[in-house]
Image (cartoon, helix red, strand yellow):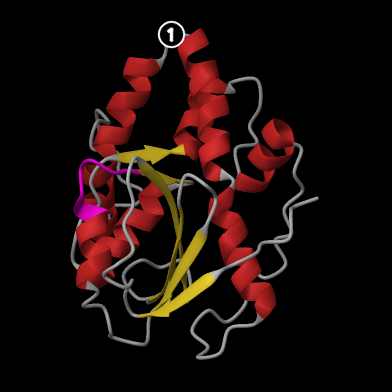
């Protein structure tokens, strides 16, 4: 079972100036829905390398967040996402900045774990870490002013395991000799997010026809 998350730090609209990160952070977002152009960003949750969760809750249209933006644009801090394509597009749409230095565990899983078609976060936690995530709060109202303890724990659980998952997948990718391919995929993600924001979700720019 997933561990009980302790010491979740909740902030409104931005991180405090005194919070610093180095090395790598795990990031996820919660939105009102799955349409990146119409469903607003409600939360950004972050976990540092020690598994400490930080959650930024945004009030509607309050996306200045200068401290958070500085971290997201810092090329010296690796940002680990699960399905980065969606998260970085939502961040670009709402905060107006593109994340730099990106890693995606979903892409890494698809490259490394070709023996399965199960690449969701719940699947990776179960298969790689023997952790059973509770996803019951996934479709709850993330725009609420007062988030429940279950919502906060769900949000934290979406990031606190990503560092460990990355480490497991990196070993598999190296074993299979796919490091360069993974790197190229991660570097393409900002471009793919820009295509998604243009509404080109189902268009393949590389397709012959």
> According to the image, label 1 marks what residue?
177
Q: Position of residue 103 (x, y in %)?
A: 38, 38
* Residue 116 is inside the magenta segment: no
Q: Nearer the viewer, residue 23 or 64?
A: 23
Task: Answer with left or right where residue 33 lies relative to residue 86.
Answer: right
Q: Nearer the viewer, residue 46 or 184?
A: 46
Q: Is residue 93 above or below residue 115?
A: below
Which range is magenta? Answer: 72-78
Residue at image x 28%, y 84%? Answer: 62
Q: Residue at x 51, y 9 (%)?
A: 175
Position of 158 with respect to 41 (left or right) is right
* Residue 91 place in picture, x, y as percent: 30, 63
The picture places residue 66, in percent across and down from the top left corner, at 19, 71
Residue at horizontal 74 percent and vertical 54 percent from the top: 3
Residue 31, quarter of picture: bottom left
**As drawn, which residue projects farthest toward the right?**
1
Is residue 71 something one can see in this rendering?
yes
């Amino acid at each position: 079972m997933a561990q009980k998350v302790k010491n979740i730090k909740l902030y409104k609209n931005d991180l405090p100036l005194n919070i610093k990160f180095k090395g790598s952070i795990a990031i996820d977002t919660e939105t009102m829905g799955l349409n990146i152009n119409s469903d607003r960003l409600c939360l950004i949750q972050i976990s540092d390398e020690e598994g400490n969760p930080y959650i930024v809750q945004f009030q509607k249209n309050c996306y200045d967040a200068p401290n958070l933006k500085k971290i997201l644009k810092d090329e010296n801090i690796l940002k680990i996402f699960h399905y980065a394509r969606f998260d970085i597009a939502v961040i670009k749409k709402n905060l107006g900045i593109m994340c730099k230095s990106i890693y995606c565990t979903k892409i890494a899983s698809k490259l490394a774990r070709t023996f399965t078609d199960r690449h969701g976060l719940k699947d990776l936690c179960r298969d790689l870490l023997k952790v059973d995530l509770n996803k019951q709060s996934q479709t709850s109202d993330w725009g609420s002013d007062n988030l429940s303890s279950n919502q906060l724990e769900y949000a934290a659980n979406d990031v606190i395991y990503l560092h460990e998952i990355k480490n497991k997948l990196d070993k598999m990718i190296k074993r299979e000799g796919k490091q360069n391919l993974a790197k190229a995929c991660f570097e393409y993600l900002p471009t793919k997010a820009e295509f998604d924001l243009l509404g080109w979700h189902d268009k393949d720019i590389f397709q012959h026809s």
